[in-house]
């Protein structure tokens, strides 16, 4: 342990805060966007309010149709990378499995 900065050593041995993977769309069977965040409510609010420039704003992706919780943000980031490389059909099946009507799930996370 000699030479290690204590703060760095602690971070190397502790789990990082949790994270979320989510899928947004603009409509039933519409365009899909996969994202990751440490604060799902805040991030979806930013998308819905148009605060986030880029893909989601350009295509009006405001409907939260899928999300997963992870205890460690690193696991959430890895899951996001995996899902982003899936074929569209797999993402649609994953969404349909938990949300067959593609309902907007934002209200379920803000209660």
Image (cartoon, helix red, strand yellow):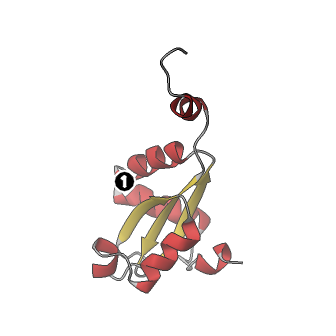
Q: State the SS at label 1.
A: helix
Residue at x 58% of width, y 44% of height? 72
Q: Compare residues 4 and 53 and report the one nearer the observer.
A: 4
Q: Position of residue 94 (x, y in %)?
A: 51, 59
Side of 84 where 12 appears, left or right: right
| Residue 62 horizontal/vertical position (percent) | 44, 80
Q: Is residue 97 visible?
A: yes
| Residue plotted at (65% across, 73% down) | 109
Left or right: residue 106 compared with residue 80: right
The answer to whether residue 62 is visible is no
Up/down of 98 relative to 73, above or below: below
Q: Is residue 51 above or below residue 1?
A: below
Q: Is residue 111 left or right of residue 68?
A: right
Seen from the viewer's position, the closer of residues 85 and 7 is: 7
Check disc 1: other Cα within 10 Å, few if <14, some if 14-19, many if 20+: some
Residue 67 lies, in percent from the top left, at 56, 62
Residue on which disc 1 sits:
84
Compared across the picture, whether 41 is left or right of 50 comes to right
Where is residue 105, by image quadrant? bottom right
**Which is nearer the eye, 44 or 13?**
13
């Amino acid at each position: 342990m000699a030479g290690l900065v204590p703060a760095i050593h602690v971070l190397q041995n502790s789990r990082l805060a949790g994270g979320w993977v989510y899928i947004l769309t603009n409509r039933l069977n519409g365009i899909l966007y996969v994202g990751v965040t440490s604060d799902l409510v805040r991030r979806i609010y930013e998308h819905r309010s148009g605060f986030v420039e880029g893909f989601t704003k350009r295509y009006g992706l405001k409907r939260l149709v899928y999300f997963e919780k992870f205890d460690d943000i690193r696991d959430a980031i890895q899951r996001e990378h995996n899902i982003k490389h899936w074929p569209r059909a797999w993402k649609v099946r994953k969404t349909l499995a938990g949300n067959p009507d593609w309902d907007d799930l934002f209200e379920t996370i803000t209660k």
